[in-house]
Image (cartoon, rainbow, N blue to C red):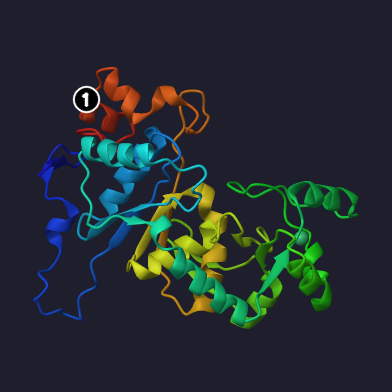
Amino acid sequence: MVESRNRKGMVLSPPHGHKPAANAILDMTQPRPTVTRFAPSPTGYLHLGHAYSALFTWEQALSGQMLLRIEDIDTSRCKPAFDTAILEDLAWLGLEWEQPVRRQSEHFDEYARALKQLEDRGVLYPCFCSRRQIRAEIKKSATAPHPPAPGEEGPLYPGTCRRLVDSERHRRRESGDAFALRLDSAKAMEMTGPLIWSDAEKGDVKATLDRLGDVVLARKETPASYHLAVTLDDHLQGVSLVTRGDDLFQSTHVHRVLQALLGLDTPRYHHHRLLTGGDGQRFAKRDQSQTIRSLREAGKTADEVRAMVGYGDGDTP
Ligand SMILES: [Zn+2]
């Protein structure tokens, strides 16, 4: 068993050491132990930002369980070698997690079922626009678009295909045109009514899709979007506390709406600050000098790397 130390230097039992035995009688008057998850994508080596996020998650799960989920729905960008490296680097940092590890690429059938449920509820529509067409459409529209929300790929989708008539949708699908499935955000919100979700730092937050608009929930090459997959995963894995970076704060609005539409549990959320390097820029996968792996190869100990992100002995983040 790998020993893990908390930031005061005490050796701690790993989170799963607190799991009640399977035959224990549950005391319903006690709050259920926290179940958190760390969910990296195997598109590169983990960097210091990931180390911080993983340790943050682990700390939140000290009296509960920490799960590990490999977010590899984008099979064109994810590599098995990075998947292996994630497990090695986290273990080297002294972290432990529950088994089995969930890999999204093994659950496409579950995402497809959820997508079908949403389609049956009438809240999806096919979008045939290319990225270039979307940019052109925004340019010619009179109203200035919102700047993209942090963590989002581009500006708000202007809703072009939402206005297509059924016969046109049918014709284009039949003719084999590539399309994505988008959430009709206005219709979805009308269906769910007002929704609240809870963030550890911001308190109760009223769900709104104004910032992200009609998000893509599936594409031909990626049959489930990040939004759909993580919302379903967190429910299926019994996650009670979602910890992740501030860059995904806006996404949680979408996830709350999907939970309501699909009848899923709503976990609590804790969006944490994003760790930045000496230059004030956040760590990114392309910055290979600050990967956990490269630091280890340069002779740093796990203690030293933990200390670099505020989880060293005696540190107070
Ligand atoms: Zn479109």
Residue lying at the far top of the rendered structure = 298
Q: Position of residue 86 (x, y in %)?
A: 32, 40
User: What amino acid does circle 1 point to?
Assistant: Thr
Place of residue 230 in the rendered image (x, y in percent of width and height, measured from the top left) = 45, 61
Asked where in the image residue 98 lies, by quadrant, the reply is bottom left
- Judge left or right: residue 273 versus residue 315: right
- Horizontal and vertical percent position of residue 252: 52, 61
Label 1: element kind: loop
Decide if residue 317 is in sight here: no
Percent of width and height locating residue 14: 15, 50
Number of residues whose C-alpha sits closer than 10 Å to that of mark 1, classed few (under 14), some (14–19) or many (20 or more): some
Nearest the viewer among 109 and 226 is 109
The quadrant of the rendering that contains the N terminus is top left
Q: Which residue is mark 1?
A: 301
Quadrant housing the C terminus: top left
User: In the shown orientation, is residue 155 left or right of residue 89?
Assistant: right
> Visible in this render: residue 60?
yes
Figure check: 287 above or below 6: above
Cβ of mark 1 under 8 Å from ligand 1: the answer is no
- The foreground one among 92 and 129 is 129
